[in-house]
Every structure is written in structure tokens, then in C-alpha cells.
Image: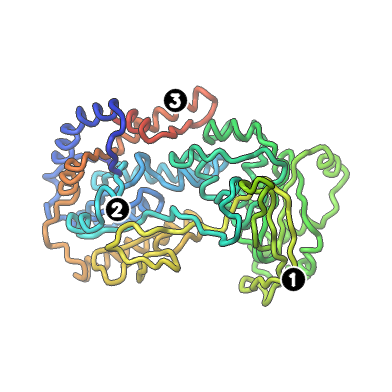
């Protein structure tokens, strides 16, 4: 079985679906869904609840159910659909990265794992209620907030966070109406990590390429009409400190219909320093140096002369102000402080020189990081670091409460990093059971106790089999358009498909 968030139905259709399905859902829950036959498991089996159905949640669940044969895991997710940033964060033209969904599906379908979508922990259920129902609660709900630039003008129309922009083209329901203004020639992306390069690539990719991906249709239509022809990817430090990886830079260098537009002076001294760099950093830097400084051959010169779109890194720059158009409502440009570096290598610091540079643009996308948000007043939260304070995944001063993923470490690394992070938390939890630090001898009701609370509050979870109906419908719609998937963008529509 599967289920996650709780929402009061907003339309008569959904109300009727909820009323007709509620009793059968409660009966199924008590009879033992998800293949969980109650006679097979003791009522005092260790019961673990995971809050968040993204990579961190699924990897934590995967390790727990593989490592201990009597342990039961329930995953609660705010949205009706699982997989978090694998569904909503991975670029649509990187379908191979989404293959991990197959592994997550196997976990969700395991006899000792249940998924509950459409359940908003912190609103529909409190963390304390979950702690009373389960022996352990693992918080894995990720990083849904935006880091602020902290500069004047950042709230003007035409300024967006990369998180929101990515969510728009990837189909997060709450971002479906973002409607970014793509009517100007130049866009500036602040930040030089992989997400920044994803954004730049999507802005400049040929529409015929994007048509074959699972990018949402509204985003595809907007990008087809886009007037953006130039994307500058701005970072506060230099070429040897960029946070992206070579794969993403290579994709930009090879992006059809575009040419690199670099400033040769920003690479001064870099070629000489290459031999001192670790191999991955060396290869990445060599690729950038080649794009910036190497004189192209005749064929490449001819190709570049025919293309209308360009992209380029801009180094040693920090935003100090978003400049407003004459009507004072929207962005017309950005003022950048020019920096110099103190120190070298990864530890080099950007220090303002006092000089500034103004860049005219109609779109500013800030890719300076995600941040986690507090979920419940009972859970400790470090607002400065935007994490739940923890030791090896154990939430401080809260026995039985754990965290994994970005909520544990901050928003760093790739999916493989999250996997290892989550496995570590699972190991910590299992060590606590084995040592007796976590007492699992008392009988806990688990999902059966939670189901009564949800029923009282008018909340109907979405099970994994319900999600499979949504999946099937999205795949059907995509095939009709020559795409792998066309995502449903409205929660109410998701619920209607799930419960019909």
C-alpha cells in the first residue's frame, strides 16, 4: 500500500471520491495492505516512519528493510506523487538519472514498506503524533526553501530562484503558474553549480530536443516562443572554483545552435596552474580553458558564425543590486561587484575590489542554493545552517527521531551522495535498536494508529497503487504527444486519477 499527504477535498467530484473510497481504504489499511499480511509480523515488530518520499526517504527505507527482516517502514509524502527531486529536480534531458525510480519502486512495493502520499506532516499530522505511533521517525523531507541573495531589487518581477524555475519546467504543482518572462535577449544565472548549468541549458536548448523529454507542455510552449539568446552564468570566484562537474560543462560546450562566449582575461594564469590540480578539477578546468582561449578551426568558426545563441561563464562577480526598469516593477539589469581572490584553490575567498559592472538583462535566476525549512515546533532546527541539528543522523536531544538527506547535511552533492548519507542514517538507527538505545519492545500501532487520525481529519492518503494509476495516465498522455510522460500539474487532478 502507499499513502502520504492529507488534503481536504476541494471539489464535489473529489468529495464524492473521498466518501466512496474512505471506508474501503480504512478497511484495507487495517486488513494489511502493501502486501503486509498481519499474521506474518508481530505487533511489536519495529515500526519506522519516514517523512518525505524523495531520494533520501527511499534510500533510508531501502537500507532499513534490507538490513532487518522484521522491521516495517511507512513513508509519508506531502504530494500525491513520490520521488521528490528525482521527479521534480532532475533536468528533463537527463532521463538516465531518473532510472533510480525503478529501485525506489521496488522498495515501495516491498511487503514491509508502505507509501502514503497526500499527507502533509506538520499540517495534517504532527511529528509528536508520529512519534507516538512509531518506534522511530526519520525526517527526510529535503530542502524546499530558497536562499535569499540579500540584495535590493531581488523581489522585482523577472527575478526567480533556480529552484522555482526548475520546478516550473519539471511540473511541481505549486509552481505551474510561474510564467517567467522570456521576452528579453539576455538572461543572467547567478551561481555556477550543476543546477545553474541545467537552467542555462534548458533556456538555450533546441525545442526539437526538449519535445522528446518529459518537460511540461506549458514550459515547452513558453520556451518555443522565448527570445532569450544569451545566458551568462555568473560566479563570485574563478574558473578553478566552479561548483559544476565536467559532464554539465561538456553539455554546454556541445549544445547545438550555441557558441561559448568567455572573457579570456578571466583565465589569466589558469593554464599554468593546471598541473597542480587534482585530476577531476584539472579535466574540468582544461575544458573551460579550451572553450575560452583556444582558437577554433575553420569548420568550428563557420558553425559559430551561423548560430544565434550564446552562453558564457562570468567569473569574479557578485550581485549587489537588481536594477529596475523605469516602471520600477520589473528587472532591467543587474549590478555586479567585481572581486579578487584571496588564497588559492578550493579555499580561495572572493573579496570585492570596489568596482562594479552593470549587465542589461530581462531575466535573473538565482542558483545560490536550496535550504530546508522547519516542519514542526517540536523538532529542533538550526535556522542559520538550515538543518536539523544531528549527530550521525540522530536528532539532538530527541531519542527515536532521526534525519537524512539534505535536511541532515544541507543541500550538497548529487543523488549518490544522498544515497550514502541516507544509508548512514539507517545504519545509525539500526545500531540504536541493537544497542537498546532505541527501545522497540513496546507495542506501537504504526499506520493503524495514524489512519484513525487521518480519517477524523478528512484526509485520504494516496497509496503506491494509486500512484501507479497517475503514472499510467501520465505515460499515456506523453505517448500521445511523442514524449515519455506528460505530468499532471494540478493536485486535484492527480487525486481524481488516483481514486477513480
Q: Secondary structure at mark 3?
A: helix
What residue appears at the point 30 percent right and 41 percent down from the top-left corner? Answer: 109
Mark nearest the camera among 2 and 3 is 2
1 or 3: tag closer to the N-terminus: 1
Q: Are marks 1 and 3 in contact (CB under 8 Å)?
A: no
What residue appears at the point 25 percent right and 57 percent down from the top-left corner? Answer: 127
Residue, disc 2: 122
Would you say residue 99 is visible in this rendering?
Answer: no
Residue, disc 3: 476
Q: Reply above or below: 274 against 374.
A: below
Alpha carbon separation for disc pair 2 and 3: 34 Å
Alpha carbon separation for disc pair 1 and 2: 51 Å
What residue appears at the point 42 percent right and 58 percent down from the top-left corner? Answer: 372
Q: Secondary structure at mark 1?
A: helix
1 or 2: tag closer to the N-terminus: 2
Q: Secondary structure at mark 2?
A: loop
Q: Nearer the viewer, residue 167 or 103?
A: 167
How busy is the neighbourhood of tag 2: few (under 14 within 10 Å), some, or many (20 plus)? some
How busy is the neighbourhood of tag 1: few (under 14 within 10 Å), some, or many (20 plus)? few
Residue, disc 1: 273
Give the image's coloring scheme: rainbow
| Residue 409, position as x, y percentages in the image | 43, 64
What residue appears at the point 31 percent right and 71 percent down from the top-left corner? Answer: 396
| Residue 106, position as x, y percentages in the image | 34, 43
| Residue 478, position as x, y percentages in the image | 49, 28
* Residue 260 placement, left or right of 217: right
Q: Reply above or below: 12 against 305.
A: above
> In which quadrant will I find the C terminus?
top left
Alpha carbon separation for disc pair 1 and 3: 53 Å
Amino acid at each position: 500500500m502507499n499513502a502520504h499527504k492529507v488534503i481536504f477535498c476541494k471539489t464535489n467530484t473529489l468529495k464524492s471520491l473521498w466518501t466512496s473510497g474512505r471506508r474501503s481504504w480504512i478497511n484495507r489499511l487495517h486488513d494489511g495492505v502493501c502486501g503486509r499480511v498481519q499474521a506474518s509480523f508481530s505487533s511489536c515488530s519495529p515500526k519506522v516512519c519516514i517523512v518525505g518520499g524523495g531520494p533520501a526517504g527511499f534510500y533510508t527505507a531501502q537500507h532499513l528493510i534490507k538490513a532487518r527482516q522484521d522491521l516495517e517502514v511507512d513513508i509519508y509524502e506531502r504530494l500525491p506523487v513520490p520521488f521528490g527531486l528525482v521527479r521534480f529536480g532532475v533536468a528533463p534531458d537527463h532521463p538516465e538519472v531518473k532510472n533510480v525510480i525503478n529501485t525506489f519502486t521496488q522498495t515501495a512495493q516491498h511487503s514491509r514498506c508502505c507509501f502514503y502520499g497526500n499527507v502533509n506532516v506538520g499540517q495534517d499530522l504532527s511529528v509528536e503524533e508520529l512519534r507516538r505511533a512509531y518506534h522511530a521517525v526519520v525526517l527526510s523531507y529535503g530542502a524546499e526553501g530558497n536562499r535569499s541573495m540579500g540584495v535590493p531589487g531581488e523581489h522585482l518581477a523577472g527575478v526567480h530562484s533556480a529552484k522555482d524555475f526548475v520546478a516550473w519546467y519539471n511540473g511541481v504543482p505549486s509552481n505551474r503558474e510561474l510564467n517567467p518572462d522570456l521576452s528579453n535577449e539576455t538572461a543572467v544565472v547567478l551561481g555556477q553549480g550543476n543546477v545553474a548549468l541545467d537552467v542555462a541549458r534548458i533556456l538555450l536548448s533546441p525545442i526539437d530536443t526538449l519535445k522528446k523529454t518529459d518537460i511540461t507542455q506549458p514550459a515547452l510552449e513558453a520556451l518555443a516562443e522565448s527570445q532569450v539568446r544569451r545566458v551568462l552564468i555568473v560566479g563570485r570566484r574563478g574558473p578553478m572554483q566552479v561548483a559544476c562537474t565536467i559532464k554539465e560543462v561538456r553539455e554546454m560546450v556541445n549544445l547545438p545552435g550555441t557558441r561559448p562566449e568567455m572573457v579570456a582575461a578571466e583565465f589569466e594564469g589558469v593554464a599554468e596552474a593546471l598541473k597542480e590540480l587534482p585530476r577531476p578539477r584539472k579535466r574540468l578546468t582544461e575544458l573551460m580553458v579550451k572553450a575560452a582561449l583556444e582558437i577554433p578551426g575553420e569548420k568550428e568558426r563557420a558553425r559559430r558564425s551561423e548560430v544565434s545563441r550564446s552562453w558564457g561563464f562570468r567569473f569574479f562577480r557578485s550581485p549587489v543590486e537588481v536594477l529596475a526598469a523605469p516602471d520600477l516593477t520589473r528587472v532591467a539589469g543587474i549590478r555586479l561587484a567585481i572581486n579578487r581572490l584571496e588564497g588559492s584553490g578550493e579555499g580561495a575567498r572572493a573579496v570585492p575590489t570596489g568596482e562594479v559592472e552593470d549587465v542589461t538583462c530581462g531575466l535573473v535566476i538565482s542558483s545560490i542554493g536550496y535550504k530546508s525549512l522547519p516542519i514542526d515546533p517540536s523538532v529542533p532546527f538550526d535556522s542559520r545552517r538550515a538543518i536539523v541539528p544531528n549527530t550521525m543522523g540522530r536528532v539532538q536531544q530527541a531519542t527515536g527521531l532521526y534525519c537524512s538527506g539534505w535536511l541532515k547535511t544541507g543541500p550538497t552533492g548529487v543523488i549518490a551522495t544522498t544515497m550514502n548519507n541516507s544509508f548512514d542514517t539507517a545504519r545509525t538507527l539500526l545500531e540504536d535498536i541493537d544497542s537498546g538505545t532505541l527501545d522497540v519492545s513496546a507495542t506501537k500501532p504504526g499506520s493503524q494508529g495514524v489512519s484513525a487520525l487521518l480519517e477524523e481529519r478528512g484526509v485520504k492518503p494516496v497509496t503506491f497503487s494509486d500512484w501507479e494509476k497517475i503514472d499510467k495516465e501520465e505515460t499515456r498522455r506523453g505517448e500521445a504527444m511523442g514524449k515519455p510522460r506528460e505530468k499532471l500539474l494540478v493536485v486535484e487532478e492527480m487525486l481524481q486519477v488516483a481514486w477513480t
